[in-house]
Image (cartoon, coloured by chain):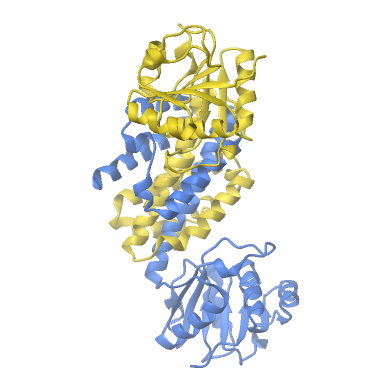
Chain colours: A yellow, B blue
Amino acid sequence: MKSIQKVILIGSGNVATQLGLALAEKGFDILQIYSKTHAHANELAKKLNSSPTNQINKIRPDADIYIISVSDNAILEVAEALPHENIFIVHTSGSTPMDIFKNKWEKYGVLYPLQTLSKSVKCDFSNIPLCLEASDRKSLERIIESGKKISRRVYHIDSEQREYLHIAAVFASNFTNHMYAIANDILEKKDIPFDILHLLLEETLRKAKSNNPAKVQTGPAIRGDNRIIDKHTEKLSSLPAYQKIYNFISQSIQNTKKLKP
Amino acid sequence: MKSIQKVILIGSGNVATQLGLALAEKGFDILQIYSKTHAHANELAKKLNSSPTNQINKIRPDADIYIISVSDNAILEVAEALPHENIFIVHTSGSTPMDIFKNKWEKYGVLYPLQTLSKSVKCDFSNIPLCLEASDRKSLERIIESGKKISRRVYHIDSEQREYLHIAAVFASNFTNHMYAIANDILEKKDIPFDILHLLLEETLRKAKSNNPAKVQTGPAIRGDNRIIDKHTEKLSSLPAYQKIYNFISQSIQNTKKLKP
């Protein structure tokens, strides 16, 4: 099995930047950076000691892997504009199935880093979960081998799993942040600083991480403490949108309890 | 103003234990521990080098403060059974107004540590937010002075604020944990370990702590990405309870966006 050594990055955004930095640091040869905007290709190429291009037909034929890291709806278009066949291409998207590549390519895959990344904040890539998938066993082994060089957390996640992983991340990250935002808004209205909750939120996350979170659920809903629930509902009558969410989620917590006695 | 030095603890549960340990460590004299169960009073008295009693009429008259740390619905009953008048009493409850004491006492207050505490896990009390309230300015100054000896985070929070603080904590901690539980359940069904999300959840909390959480909201709902929302809704059709929450909270995020353009 030929190890991956030579890499071409298609794209120059947040993921391409952080992935490129991690690969370069671990000794991969970043042959070339493509971006349709030359300044962007140039900026990233400088960081990675690589060559920029904004002409897709100038992309070299001799890389071991072509990593397409562009916005979801541009992946296929960019892939189809590549001037070579018989190349190994992967995308880095959490919400795009692998099989968008199946009509034109033989070897393809997905290399999805599960983290919020930004261009400017250098991250410790070794802790970032890498979700890998490939068209065939040999290709999968090749990207797993490469993935392990840049991260300690390598997972084989197929397209179906990746969709549910994305949904789970929406609940645990986006929806959780919305709960933080509501709490912050309620506190602001009463002149209480949000940082009064910081330690509690850290402890909530710590406990959820070291247990099954359903088993460490606390609060009035899981206790069936209707006296407190009624009091909170009444207090929220001046904030009807929050009152509705309060009752909806309290009900959901109590339903979960019924399901798992 | 006479500083608080001599303390009597009424109760021997999680809060009494951790508060007692913190007070003893900072040099307060814990004169006595009361619990209706002698073994419990004895167990905590040993830890604090103090004297146990299970007879409420044996409680000494000479403490500077009487800290009542029992379950919410027992606070008033225990307070009224105390054999002394003209004493300074406080409770440690997040969801009980201070004025339950107003008919019988002159000086009273609340000393509410905002954290999940347990008997057995020794905590670093110096980081725990202490929410303080008192019947009069002088009593407030006395408990603030004492509070500052055991915690770096002392807040003056009145009863009305404390009720909203409790509601905010339900959103940010209990409801957040429910979101973690749903994510964990979805992942379990697809054989994906929950720890794949740990780093993302840490980053979500870190960002919410260093910003206004509403301003760092991410995900399909805030982006108005209906293609992804529809796909997720369809994928959740086999889990209708989660599908309902998904749509409800996505809608709530979009409503918030409309309110704050």
Q: Is residue B5 visible?
A: yes
Residue drawn at 52 percent across, 58 percent down: A200
Q: Is residue B23 left or right of residue B213?
A: right
Horizontal side of residue B11 vs A105, given as left or right: right
Identify whether B105 is placed above or below A112: below
- In the image, B209: left or right of B31? left
Quadrant of residue A147 within the rendered picture: top right
Residue at 51% from the left image edge and 7% from the top image edge: A86
Whole-percent x, y for residue A24 in the image: 55, 31
Asked if residue B62 is positioned above or below residue A64 in the image, the reply reads below
Question: Observer-nearest residue: B123 or B189?
Answer: B123
Q: Identify the residue shown where x is 35% and y is 58%.
A: A186
In front here: B139 or B205? B205
Classify the position of the C terminus of chain A by image quarter: top right
Image quarter of residue A153:
top right
Percent across and percent down for residue B234 are 41, 24
Percent x, y of residue B91: 52, 75
| Quadrant of the rendering where the N terminus of chain A is positioned | top right
Q: Can the viewer see residue A247?
A: no
A94 over B28 or under it: above or below = above
Query: Image height check: is B46 above or below A61?
Result: below
Displayed quadrant of residue B38: bottom right
Query: For the image shown, how many numbered marks are present on the structure?
Result: 0
Q: Residue B188 in the image: x percent, y percent?
A: 59, 32
Q: Residue at x 64, y 68 (%)?
A: B13
Viewer-proximal residue among A58 and B242: A58
